[in-house]
Image (cartoon, rainbow, N blue to C red):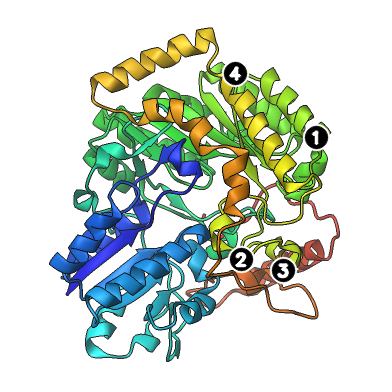
């Protein structure tokens, strides 16, 4: 079967700071190819819509899948689905990805026949059975699939992260992928899932708080196959388990693999596993993303980060001693006033780290979706990109955006002072000498992409497709009600395991009811 897989266009944040290879789509492509299908991938982050239109005709796909990890891409995806149906009326169109998994039935209805099925959960174990069912019938029986004829069984988790390996050879213009000054940059996945339960995040609800690891040998083998000199480790939290980070490091050392790395982790993980991160600096770890989210205890409690401000600031000191450049993320609460923005600017200018701002956004699959969604000021998918305010702001909306852009601009100028500019010019020169222009474009595009006028105007665009509101319930949903994936024990539990499971469920239930529960270390499945 001829299968075309599509990644939608870049979002606002990606226009400047990063453009990552679609690793999940590459793995789904590999799974489809392993099943004997002819696969073509079109990444609209780096390729044009006109090319996609031409290849819909020339390749004439019998099945077309679109990756939807971001809500903001849903209107574009529905438009692509309509074009695919027009170009090839018999083409089977399906969506998959993180965000669409939580609202599958709603999007299927909105597409009004342009989409035949939506895959909930992980795509790798679903794509081959789905394509077989497209050929032989029974699409509604495929695990994880939602279609007009109903919903299939629960989605399956991938057995091993070692396979399938991403089909990087199917990607075109790979040199367009970058993050910051790591230009070009490939991506790799060592673990999947997150055992924490931050209220604003849906990573843990998607995977049902499971946590899986690639084998050190498999990770090193894949790293050896990557041609780019720079690699972004896409794990939600890198090196939670020190023995796993050490195991991969040992394999890379044995193979004498050296690259420059960028990763994301938590402050408490960095503090607890300093030796592992220090070892990785010797392998080439240069950049780290820390989701601090807030600079005070009140904000951290609001987002249930389970760390203290002291933890965050100690982690910054540790990273500085290791020579790791840190990018900090802070969540902008729409309730901020001008004084709060001023305090944040002062903080950002007082530390040497890069500071990024993202706007608090309730997403389906998060706990705050069920507490904040009924206050939404818009349900336009395109504004759910962590750069727009979608709940009421304390400041008038135009003033909120002016403060937001002003704050981020002040922060960015901090890194373009004389001494930093000289360093940036050195990086820029090296990249340009290799024909890499992504970092150069990033430096000069901020004012054109980020401006209050553009963000305000985005709210005035005609809206065709809107998010659903959460269903009304007598009580808030339990945690497992939010899960896409759930783990079923392979063997009956022993009595002591049943007792521990009951105790864990009791702690969770009390936590949901607002009691203080001491849980210093997460207890993920599969660690």
Q: Position of residue 314 (x, y in %)?
A: 68, 26
Whole-percent x and y of residue 196? 63, 53
Judging by the rendered image, the residue that carries numbered circle 3 is 505
The nearer-to-camera label among 2 and 1 is 1
Decide if residue 286 is on the left or right side of residue 273.
left
Question: In the visual, does 319 lie left or right of 168?
Answer: right
Q: Nearer the viewer, residue 60 or 234?
A: 60
Q: Position of residue 220 (x, y in %)?
A: 30, 41
Residue wearing tag 4: 414
Q: Earlier in the sequence, mark 2 or mark 3?
A: 2
Query: Which circle, 2 or 3, is nearer the viewer?
Result: 2
Crowd tier of the residue under label 1, counting other residues whose Cα lies within 10 Å: few below 14, some 14–19, many 20 or above? few
Question: In front: mark 4 or mark 1?
Answer: 1
Question: Whole-Å distance between the Cαs marked 4 and 2?
Answer: 35 Å
Residue at screen point 75% across, 43% down: 300
Tags 4 and 3 touching, CB below 8 Å: no
Residue shown at 53% from the left, 58% from the top: 382
Identify the element where label 4 is drawn.
helix
The residue nearer to you, when weighing 105 against 89, is: 89
N-terminal of the pair, mark 4 or mark 1, is 1
Mark 2 crowdedness (10 Å alpha carbons): few <14, some 14-19, many ≥20: many
Dot 4 or dot 2: first in sequence order is 2
**Element under label 2?**
loop
| Earlier residue among tags 4 and 3 | 4
Q: Report the residue marked by disc 1.
A: 338
**In whole angstroms, how far apart are the C-alphas of marks 2 and 1?**
29 Å
Q: CA distance from mark 2 to mark 3?
A: 23 Å
Give the structural element (helix, strand or loop) at label 3.
Answer: helix
């Amino acid at each position: 079967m001829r299968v075309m897989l599509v990644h939608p266009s870049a979002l606002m944040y990606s226009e400047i700071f990063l453009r990552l290879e679609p690793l999940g789509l590459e793995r789904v492509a590999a799974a489809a190819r392993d099943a004997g299908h002819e696969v073509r991938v079109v990444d609209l982050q780096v390729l044009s819509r006109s090319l996609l239109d031409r290849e819909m005709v020339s390749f004439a796909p019998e099945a077309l899948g679109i990756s939807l990890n971001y809500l903001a891409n849903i209107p574009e995806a529905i438009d692509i689905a309509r074009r695919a149906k027009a170009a090839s009326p018999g083409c089977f169109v399906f969506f998959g990805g993180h965000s669409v998994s939580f609202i599958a039935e709603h999007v299927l209805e909105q597409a009004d026949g342009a989409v035949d099925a939506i895959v909930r959960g992980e795509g790798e174990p679903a794509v081959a059975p789905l394509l077989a069912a497209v050929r032989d019938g029974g699409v509604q029986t495929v695990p994880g699939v939602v279609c007009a004829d109903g919903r299939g069984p629960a989605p399956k988790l991938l057995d091993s992260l070692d396979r399938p390996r991403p089909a990087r050879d199917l990607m075109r213009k790979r040199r367009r992928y970058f993050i910051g000054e790591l230009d070009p940059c490939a991506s790799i996945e060592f673990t999947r899932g997150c055992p924490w339960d931050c209220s604003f995040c849906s990573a843990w609800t998607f995977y049902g708080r499971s946590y899986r690891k690639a084998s050190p040998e498999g990770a090193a083998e894949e790293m050896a196959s990557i041609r780019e000199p720079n690699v972004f480790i896409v794990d939600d939290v890198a090196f939670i388990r020190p023995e796993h980070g050490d195991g991969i490091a040992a394999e890379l050392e044995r193979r004498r693999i050296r690259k420059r790395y960028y990763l994301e982790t938590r402050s408490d993980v960095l503090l607890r596993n300093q030796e592992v991160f220090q070892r990785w600096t010797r392998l080439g770890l240069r950049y780290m993303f820390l989701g601090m989210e807030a600079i005070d205890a009140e904000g951290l409690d609001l987002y249930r980060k389970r760390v203290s401000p002291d933890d965050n600031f100690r982690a910054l000191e540790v990273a500085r001693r290791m020579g790791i450049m840190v990018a900090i993320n802070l969540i902008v609460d729409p309730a901020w006033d001008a004084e709060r923005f001023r305090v944040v600017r002062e903080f950002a200018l007082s530390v040497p780290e890069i500071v990024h701002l993202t706007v608090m956004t309730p997403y389906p699959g998060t706990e705050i979706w069920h507490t904040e969604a009924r206050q939404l000021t818009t349900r336009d998918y395109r504004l759910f990109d962590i750069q727009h305010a979608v709940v009421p702001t304390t400041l008038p909306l135009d003033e909120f955006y002016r403060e937001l852009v002003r704050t981020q601009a002040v922060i960015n100028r901090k890194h373009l002072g004389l001494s930093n500019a000289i360093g940036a010019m050195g990086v820029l020169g090296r990249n340009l000498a290799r024909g890499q222009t992504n970092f150069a474009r990033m430096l000069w595009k901020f004012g054109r992409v980020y401006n209050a006028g553009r963000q305000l105007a985005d709210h005035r665009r005609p809206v065709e497709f809107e998010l659903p509101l959460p269903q009304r319930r007598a009580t808030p949903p339990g945690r497992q009600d939010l899960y896409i994936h759930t783990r079923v024990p392979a063997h009956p539990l022993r009595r002591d395991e049943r007792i521990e499971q009951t105790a864990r469920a009791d702690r969770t239930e009390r936590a949901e009811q607002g009691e203080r529960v001491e849980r210093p270390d997460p207890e993920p499945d599969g660690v």
